Amino acid sequence: MVYFNFENTIEVLDSWGVTDVLIPFLLIFTIVFAILEKTKIFGENKKNINIIISLVLGLSVVIPHVTDSYPAGSDVVDMINISLPQVGLVAVAFIMLLILVGIYGNKWIGSALSGWMALISAIAVFVIFGGAAGWWESGWFYDVFGEDAISLFVMLIVFGLIIWFITKESSPSAKITDWLKDVGDFFKGGKND
């Protein structure tokens, strides 16, 4: 009896050339078409010309990859397939940062604390994704304390900082307050007047 699962389906799609042909073609076609539509290089209502140009550019990238015509080390499709997961990782990290700022920053929008919460959120996302990438697994700190101790240490620092920011008395100097508001405004997308 043969069982079908998502892994087998992905392997079949990969063997059909989805990652080497279809995905790079669709990506290039879509980006070129969107740029041509937005910039209106060929004039208003020239969708047919924009489609043809996008189709030609998309195929001109994919066909040399399939026929193995690219010089060694300069295959555009290979570069796309290597870089897209990394771009996806950066996009996910940025979205996580926006979620954390939105969760913790909304209570303190307009206050100096929102800037600190944005900074703490950025550090937390950096630490989490750096740990997933294996950046923190080497070095003396990891060798001495181990993975569990480092996780506990980071958790205590983050929760300690959050509790300190919530319970501290608000008497910062004007310069620090202005700087923190600017950081908070940066992560909120502009100043609210």
Image (cartoon, rainbow, N blue to C red):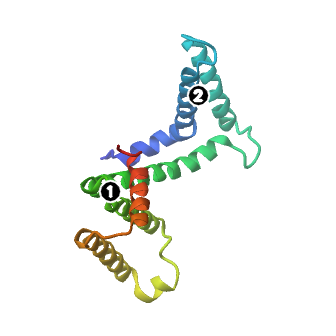
Query: Where's residue 106, x and y in %?
Result: 27, 52
Determine the residue located farthest toward the right in the rendered image. 71
| Element class at badge 2 | helix
**Amino acid on which the number 1 mark rests in the picture:** Leu
Of the 4 image quadrants, the one containing the C terminus is top left
User: Where residue 179 sits: x, y (%)?
Assistant: 44, 61
Q: CA distance from mark 2 to mark 1?
A: 33 Å
Seen as rendered, the residue at the extreme top is 45
20 displayed left or right of 94: right
Q: Nearer the viewer, residue 161 or 9?
A: 161
Horizontal and vertical percent position of residue 163: 25, 72
In the depicted structure, whether residue 54 falls above or below residue 171? above
Name the residue rendered at 37%, 51% in the picture.
98
Q: Residues within 10 Å of mark 1 (few under 14, many from 20)?
A: some
Position above or below: 183 against 62: below
For residue 116, above or below residue 71: below
Checking the image for residue 32, the label placed there is: 2
Question: Can you tell which mark lies on residue 100?
Answer: 1
Residue 159 vs 23, above or below: the answer is below
Identify the secondary structure beneath mark 1: helix
Q: Residue at x 50, y 50 (%)?
A: 85
Left or right of 160, for residue 144: right
